[in-house]
Image (tube, helix red, strand yellow):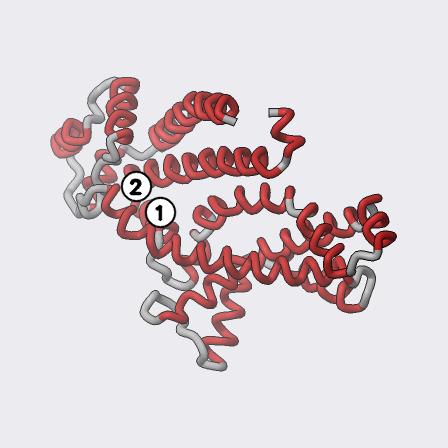
Amino acid sequence: MRDFITKRLISMIPILIGISFLSFVIINLSPSDPAEVALRVNEITVTEEAAQQMREELGLDKPFFERYTTWLKDCLKGDFGNSYVNKKPVAKEIVEALPATLKLAGVSLAITIIISVIAGVLCAVYEGSIGDKITRGVIFLGTAMPSFWVGLLLMWLFAVKLNLFPTSGMETANSVVLPAITLSLAYISTYVRLIRNNMVKNKKENYVLYARVRGLKESTIIKHVFKNSLQSSITALGMSIPKLIAGTVVVENIFAWPGIGRLCVNAIYNRDYPIIQAYILIMAILFVVCNLLVDVISVMIDPRMRLEA
């Protein structure tokens, strides 16, 4: 395990460097001059002298690779530069917005796990029943509906018509309910299918037949089947955590949730390049780290994968 983790950590280094380089290159390929953008967002008249002075202030007059190296070194220190709009440190802006996103993603993850496990197990146990067919039909609809439309429907029904939840913001404790449900619907559909299909497949294995021959209780057999069906679900769940955090962009803007996704969208509208670069880099690092953790956990709980590793 130690050698496996060491190799994976070493392999992450070129991946992270490549991600940082791509995020820096993509922003620099923009046709807009960052100096002019910085002047316009601060309502300063764009002149050649002002633009040149801003380029020097932002370090844009230096060669490309020198700017990239400087930016990368600063990022390793936790310094992502300053926002073009309010001149605040980007790291501070992200730290202030991140707790709201983590709260939304955490509640969505809890909803996803609870509903997926219950629905997936019941559908597998009562395979082919009317309840199984209805559940799969609802899951199909949940997968097909885009999150922004679901969010608007939930807002119209539960906030406008029934007045049970607030329409936007993060003022009360129940403000997180509607955005969390909206965010979790697509993931619930995925995990119910995964759990159900894996359990149905495992129900046909020889160990299940042997357990029934021995006279074990059906509830005990279901527990073993469920445990042996979790491998692919755990792998998918680990990769869904960064997707939940990165995928809050649409939901946060619909419900005016003050998270990092909304911060990124506002930065795109204002062409606030330092925030966009930092967002891309942080989300990419999050995906790489979660992928590593999922691989390590999978190897730890599955002896077959441990042998291959």
Comparing 281 with 135, the one in front is: 135
Label 2: state its secondary structure: helix
User: In the rendered image, which quarter contains the C terminus?
Assistant: top right
Q: Residue 13 lies in what quarter of the image? A: top left
State whether residue 100 is above or below residue 21: below
Comparing 63 with 280, the one in front is: 280
Residue that appears at 46% across and 63% down: 179
Residue that appears at 28% across and 29% down: 76
Q: Are marks 2 and 1 in contact (CB under 8 Å)?
A: yes
Residue on which the image places disc 2: 275
The mark that comes first in sequence, 2 or 1, is 1
Q: State left or right for residue 193 relative to residue 128.
A: left
Q: Residue 308 lies in what quarter of the image? A: top right
Label 1: state its secondary structure: helix
State whether residue 197 is above or below residue 294: below
Q: Position of residue 232 (x, y in %)?
A: 64, 42
Tag shown at residue 264: 1
Q: State left or right for residue 151 relative to residue 71.
A: right
Q: Position of residue 270 (x, y in %)?
A: 30, 46
Residue that appears at 66% across and 55% down: 192
Name the residue type under label 2.
Answer: Ile
Tag shown at residue 90: none
Mark 2 and mark 1: Cα distance apart in space: 7 Å
Q: Residues within 10 Å of mark 2 (few under 14, many from 20)?
A: many
In the displayed orientation, state which residue is furthest to the front.
214
Residue that appears at 53% across and 61% down: 111
Q: Position of residue 242 (x, y in %)?
A: 47, 44
Name the residue type under label 1.
Answer: Cys
Q: Residues within 10 Å of mark 1 (few under 14, many from 20)?
A: many
Q: Residue 268 lies in what quarter of the image? A: top left
State whether residue 220 is above or below residue 246: below
